[in-house]
């Protein structure tokens, strides 16, 4: 079953309908759903899907010849396969002169490993032939480092692509389609454990509870247990230090100093490895929402819930999994899970507010949103419109609140808001929790949402 990716398909369709020659680069981390997206696109529009393998150039060309010959019903090509990449591009140039031809080459980096000259050959054919045809060429790859190198200034194909698409994990509201039988609380838990990668989301069975699914996760032969190592080792050289840094962040050590203390690594070393993790989209650096991006107050967080959960609970306890003590680990994780889900819920509320902002359901349209902190004081989310000088301050709680507790939280939020330093701004205040007693009375003076309000938005989106 193909789920979501409506925007991505729309972008691909728009370029297809444009009629001009297209050279599109699609990339993203392994398991993110690139192949499923491209196969769905081909299913709707026709075309040729060519999957590269880690084998010789001769073997890849032979396999490609067979697929292309079958598509065009060309018996001569079937008996006389391409002997070079020049022959391949010469053939598709001729075939796309007068009619639209969609060709998707998946795992393109495998071809470059076997034929380093391939980008230069593609550059030549694009410049001299293909850009004047009706070709719709898509190259796709999972190695982010190699794909971004191919897109870089020094690459022969730099400047030739007509579009690029970096596929990202699904958001919380899109992940709902994988778990129609889960309550909102269970959905938050599942999303906090699995993140938005489709290949991981399909591993949970929503006819089973979270704990029961975790028992399947915490097995030595489990896909979810082993795939983190596989994906990270594919991207990272010397993974030991990267793993130490990601484990430190997952435990809550988010500043540079905290990461250094936890790992025992020097500042320069930590900085270098963090830079690589950020470039690969595995870690993000946050600064207070009112600060410059160059601020030294940066905090580091793992981008994907799957890896955050894995480094917080699985990687440090791999010996328990290997010894068949998965049940004991499930109990320990379930006891701590609500603590972990606090930050997960903040990110979900961030996404929720962005959706409300798009639909104009907030007091004003914000242009920036994020966390704020200074000298031990924190506000979960602050939304700003600098031109209109308006601000919305929001606290997020992954628990139920009695009315008195909610009022105390809002009172303290107003105190902290004065520390942000937005004198003369119009200020609004909000609270988001699993559920809140006395919410109608509280809404007289603030914005307030419960988990059920997130569910309403989710239903509207679908």
Image: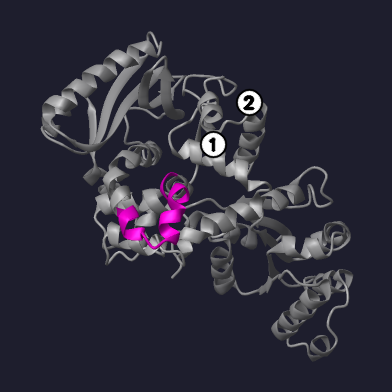
Q: Disc 2 marks which residue?
A: 267
Looking at the picture, tell me which residue is in the foreground, 12 or 381. 381
State the colouring used for the structure image.
one colour
Looking at the picture, tell me which residue is in the foreground, 276 or 19. 276
Occupied quadrant, residue 176: bottom left
Asked which secondary structure carries label 1, the reply is strand
In this picture, is 423 found above or below 2? above
Residue found 71% across the figure and 85% down from its top: 70
The image shows residue 82 at horizontal and vertical percentages of: 85, 78
Q: Disc 1 marks which residue?
A: 284
Let me know if residue 38 is in the magenta part. Answer: no
Residue found 30% across the figure and 43% down from its top: 336
- Magenta segment, prevailing SS (helix, strand or loop): helix
Cα distance in 3D space between marks 1 and 2: 18 Å
Residue found 54% across the figure and 60% down from its top: 31
In this picture, is 366 found above or below 399? above
- First along the sequence among labels 1 and 2: 2
Select label 1 or label 2 by which is in front. Answer: 2
Q: Is residue 109 left or right of residue 270?
A: right
Residue found 66% across the figure and 55% down from its top: 143
Magenta region, residue range? 312-330
Note whether residue 208 is visible.
Answer: yes
Q: Residues within 10 Å of mark 1 (few under 14, many from 20)?
A: some
The image shows residue 56 at horizontal and vertical percentages of: 80, 72
Asked which secondary structure carries label 2, the reply is helix
Looking at the picture, tell me which residue is in the foreground, 314 or 381. 314
In this picture, is 275 found above or below 306? above
């Amino acid at each position: 079953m193909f789920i979501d990716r409506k925007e991505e398909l729309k972008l691909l369709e728009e370029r297809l309908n444009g009629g001009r020659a297209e050279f599109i680069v699609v990339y993203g981390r392994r398991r993110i759903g690139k192949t499923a997206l491209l196969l769905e696109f081909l299913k709707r529009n026709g075309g040729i899907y060519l999957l590269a393998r880690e084998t010789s150039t001769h073997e890849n060309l032979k396999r490609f010849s067979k697929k292309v010959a079958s598509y065009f019903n060309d018996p001569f090509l079937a008996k006389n396969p391409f002997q070079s990449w020049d022959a391949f591009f010469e053939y598709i140039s001729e075939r796309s002169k007068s009619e639209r031809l969609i060709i998707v080459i998946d795992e393109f980096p495998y071809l470059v490993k076997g034929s380093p000259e391939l980008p230069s050959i593609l550059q030549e054919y694009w410049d001299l032939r293909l850009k004047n045809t009706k070709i719709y060429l898509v190259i796709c790859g999972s190695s982010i480092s190699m794909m971004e190198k191919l897109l870089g200034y020094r690459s022969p194909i730099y400047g030739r692509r007509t579009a690029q698409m970096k596929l990202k994990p699904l958001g919380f509201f899109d992940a709902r389609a994988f778990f129609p039988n889960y309550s909102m609380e269970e959905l938050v838990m599942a999303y906090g454990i699995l993140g938005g990668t489709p290949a991981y989301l399909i591993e949970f069975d929503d006819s089973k509870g979270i704990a029961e699914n975790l028992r399947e996760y915490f097995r030595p032969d489990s896909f979810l247990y082993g795939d983190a190592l596989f994906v990270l080792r594919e991207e990272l050289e010397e993974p030991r230090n990267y793993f130490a840094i990601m484990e430190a962040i997952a435990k809550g050590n988010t500043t540079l100093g905290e990461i250094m203390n936890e790992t025992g690594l020097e500042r320069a070393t930590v900085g270098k490895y963090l830079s690589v993790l950020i470039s690969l989209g595995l870690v993000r650096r946050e600064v207070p929402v009112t600060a410059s991006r160059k601020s030294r107050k940066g905090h580091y967080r793992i981008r994907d819930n799957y890896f955050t959960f894995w480094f917080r609970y699985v990687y440090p306890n791999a010996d328990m999994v290997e010894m068949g003590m998965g049940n004991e680990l499930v109990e320990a994780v379930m006891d701590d899970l609500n603590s972990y889900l606090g930050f997960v819920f903040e990110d979900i509320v961030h996404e929720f507010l962005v959706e409300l902002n798009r639909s104009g359901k907030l007091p004003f349209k914000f242009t920036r949103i994020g966390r704020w902190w200074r000298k031990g004081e924190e506000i979960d989310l602050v939304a700003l419109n600098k031109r209109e000088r308006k601000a919305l301050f929001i606290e997020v709680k992954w628990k139920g609140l009695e009315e008195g507790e909610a009022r105390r939280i809002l009172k303290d939020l107003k105190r902290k808001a004065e520390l942000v330093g937005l004198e003369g701004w119009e200020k609004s205040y909000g609270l988001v929790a699993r559920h809140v007693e006395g919410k109608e009375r509280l809404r007289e003076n603030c914005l307030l949402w419960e988990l059920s309000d997130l569910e309403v938005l989710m239903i509207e989106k679908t």
